[in-house]
Amino acid sequence: MSKVVALKCALCGRTFAQEAGVKTCPHCGVDGTMHVFYDYEEVAKTFTRRSLAADSRHSLWRYDALLPVEEGSVRPNLQVGWTPLYDEPKLAQRYGVASVKVKDDGRNPTASLKDRASAIAVTMALEQGQSTVACASTGNAASSLSGFAAVTGLNSVIFVPETAPIAKVTQLLVYGAKVFLVRGDYAQTVELAMKAIEHHGWYDRNCAINPYLVEGKKTCAMEIAEQCNWDLPDIVFVSVGDGCIVSSMYKGFYDLKQVGLIETIPAIVGVQAEGACPIHRAIQAGSNRVEFGAANTIADSISVGAPRNWAKALNAIRSSGGTTVAVSDSEILESLCELPRLTGVFAEPAGVAAYAGFRHMALEGRLKADERVVLVVTGNGLKDVASAQKAVQSAMTVDTGSEGLEQIEAFLQGEER
Amino acid sequence: MSKVVALKCALCGRTFAQEAGVKTCPHCGVDGTMHVFYDYEEVAKTFTRRSLAADSRHSLWRYDALLPVEEGSVRPNLQVGWTPLYDEPKLAQRYGVASVKVKDDGRNPTASLKDRASAIAVTMALEQGQSTVACASTGNAASSLSGFAAVTGLNSVIFVPETAPIAKVTQLLVYGAKVFLVRGDYAQTVELAMKAIEHHGWYDRNCAINPYLVEGKKTCAMEIAEQCNWDLPDIVFVSVGDGCIVSSMYKGFYDLKQVGLIETIPAIVGVQAEGACPIHRAIQAGSNRVEFGAANTIADSISVGAPRNWAKALNAIRSSGGTTVAVSDSEILESLCELPRLTGVFAEPAGVAAYAGFRHMALEGRLKADERVVLVVTGNGLKDVASAQKAVQSAMTVDTGSEGLEQIEAFLQGEER
């Protein structure tokens, strides 16, 4: 039996019983607006700081009591979640804040935060007796879903824009997914996928339709709270594409507050790329609607002009007392080198966007000296080496033997001068 | 103070006090033969199964008592080790053995097992007051070292053959390493590196010279023992290039046996690529020497014709009662897809070699039905997407809208026929 008791529309506030199976609010008719709620009073009886401290599951399943899966149903055999949260005093000093912590979600099984959602998706698909899962994705959600489908014996059908980085597409094919490269942008890819998924009755892992993905992703926020020993940061920076991850950060803290494990929710700052920042524009304009538009940024995972979870995203940012910031592609590329050189964490462009946004606000003097900051890295740098190449100088080629030694010395002396 | 008490030559058996600082046995004059030993009796007093069970460090530092680093010296701020060990009943059933477990060391900070050695290398370099670390590498050891150098504030100088996969070279540059691409093979690259390193007095992270790298890598074996709840497998499969990792697997079990935590050592099977299998040839011929030769395999991380740790590798394989097996590149490519489709673990060619070797021996009927097997995956598949591309069919490109839907239906119907 599912532990979810109700779904609530982020736009109109109407509540629906879980049994009704509502995915899109019948009143608002907008996709991607549904929040998932639990019987928090009941959960709070046994789910405590102490029960967590005694829980040896170092994965997202330690938060099972607040996940939309059935007790005792089959879980995918991949270790997902409980990724490192690094304290980075060098960053704090450099940018003049009290502390900076980096949450490296590129350490998940398929190397992105999306694994948290896929773990939930395949578990629910199996519970429902489905044999095929499907999604449209800029890449990470897809490779994640195909990996989790593979390990659970499900078929996966994936729709990606044909411009998706080859590493991500290859990862899909390696996992045995049926992959359709769509001659169009992300919005068109989603549209095509939704039609095919509806036609075939496949389990839908699109965040526009499936309200349970946020529930998997929220465990990242829960881990941050627990790994900070419940002494929460003031601000959490996270990149924003569809708006699903930023919503999930808020939801994770919200759920912890509902069960009495924390008292306040950190301000959540959503970072978008300048070339794809519809949510940023809405927040800055104080608007309750998001204008869709084109998307053009090197950070493919957040290259989203028509964010499907805009309503939940606006809610999350505003309810947390947060804000948004837009960063240029050149800021992203600068950050792509700066972050690993200071922390050892190599992130893909969208993964490093949170850092770029933090840096941007710090350099503009918008962060206070006593503020404690967490940066969420959403994907590993190896996911998109082509972009990383744009950020670095090329290496020096040398010969073997004594000629090589001379070339090396000449180079090193040249550097010293 | 270092906890190491002695070094012992794998060839002649001569022992040297740690203080003597011997790297190459003065009697044998061969590089890469030195074993590192501790005061096992002293360690055994406090390092027990119970002390480990109570240890909350989920990283290689839980084995600190048997590592060549000083107590309380600075450790790099990256979470390395304690990677997942997955039970894979599907593999056991498919290949007719009692159990198969997969150790996914691609989940380390820079996505390979080499991080275990780099963690030790930078810790020792800092202890010794060095400011620069250096190595030659086919790629993984280098990107690993550069990542660990970055986070500890050390400079890194890296020598790679110019044929190294671009993902690995880019990773180096992102971490801020000085990179020299050498116009030669791996052996020539090592030779050039060793000369430059000696000339400048940099800390040497080459496994040919540095006997302490095995000490970091051995923690993988220690984790296997602990994660199996001390109920050890019969066979551990691991890929072999330079021979450093296969040596470390034996050393990890050996050290645990010395301190009384285990009673027997599993048979260690070294898997080489047919195009680069000098250690395999020596084992099959019963020879005490290894003939160097050319190297040609898709598995770049084990494309080593002149293995620097051959003496320790022969020792490890023979002392454990193990053997070697050589696999073709096409077996490696088949395994590269088969492993992720059955387990969700995506490995680079050298990382999947252990699985290919296991499969090879199973298909030849050389494994028994009651045998329990562990496969060590040494590196993540995202490290070498170009090779993975060779293993998969390309994806189907479709149009948007109703045309796309028709193309998808036609494709799916074609598949069913």
Image: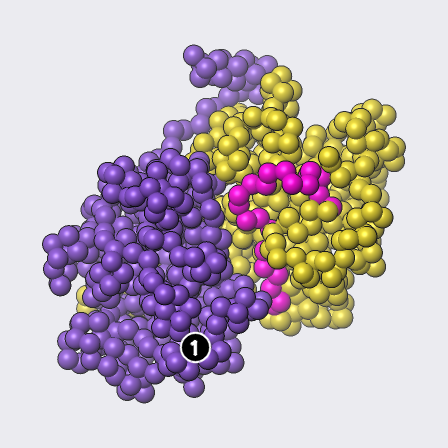
Chain colours: A purple, B yellow
Q: Main secondary structure of the magenta part?
A: loop
Residue B82 located within the stretch drawn in magenta: yes
Which picture quadrant has residue B26?
A: top right
Secondary structure of the residue carrying tag 1 is: helix
Q: Residue at x 76, y 53 (%)?
A: B47
Q: In this view of the protein, which residue sits in the foreground, A49 or A349?
A: A49
Asked whether B75 or B142 is in front, the reply is B75
Q: Position of residue B11 (x, y in %)?
A: 84, 35
Residue at screen point 42% across, 48% down:
A101
- x and y percentages locating residue A94 in the rendered image: 38, 35
Please say if B342 is above or below A124. Answer: above
What's the residue at 40%, 45% (across, down)? Answer: A99
> Could you tell me how many numbered marks the image carries?
1
Horizontal relation, residue A111 to residue B104: left or right: left
Q: Give coordinates of residue B12: x percent, y percent.
A: 87, 33
Viewer can see residue B388: no
Q: Nearer the viewer, residue A352 or A190?
A: A352
Check the residue under mark 1 and report the chain it is in.
Answer: A
Label 1: few (<14), some (14–19) or many (≥20) C-alpha neighbours in 10 Å: some
Quarter holding the C terminus of chain A is top left
Examine the structure image and report whether residue A8 is included in the region drawn in magenta: no
Which kind of residue does numbered mark 1 sit on?
Ala
- Image vertical order of residue A305 relative to residue A251, above or below: above
Q: Which residue is mark 1?
A: A44
Residue B227 visible here: yes
User: As drawn, is A215 to the left or to the right of B121?
Assistant: left
Could you say where residue B41 lies in the image, as x and y percent from the top left? 85, 48
B152 w.r.t. B272: above or below: above
Asked whether, in this view, residue A173 is left or right of residue B49, the answer is left
Viewport quadrant of the N terminus of chain A: bottom left
Q: Residue at x 34, y 47 (%)?
A: A371
Range of the magenta residues? B66-88
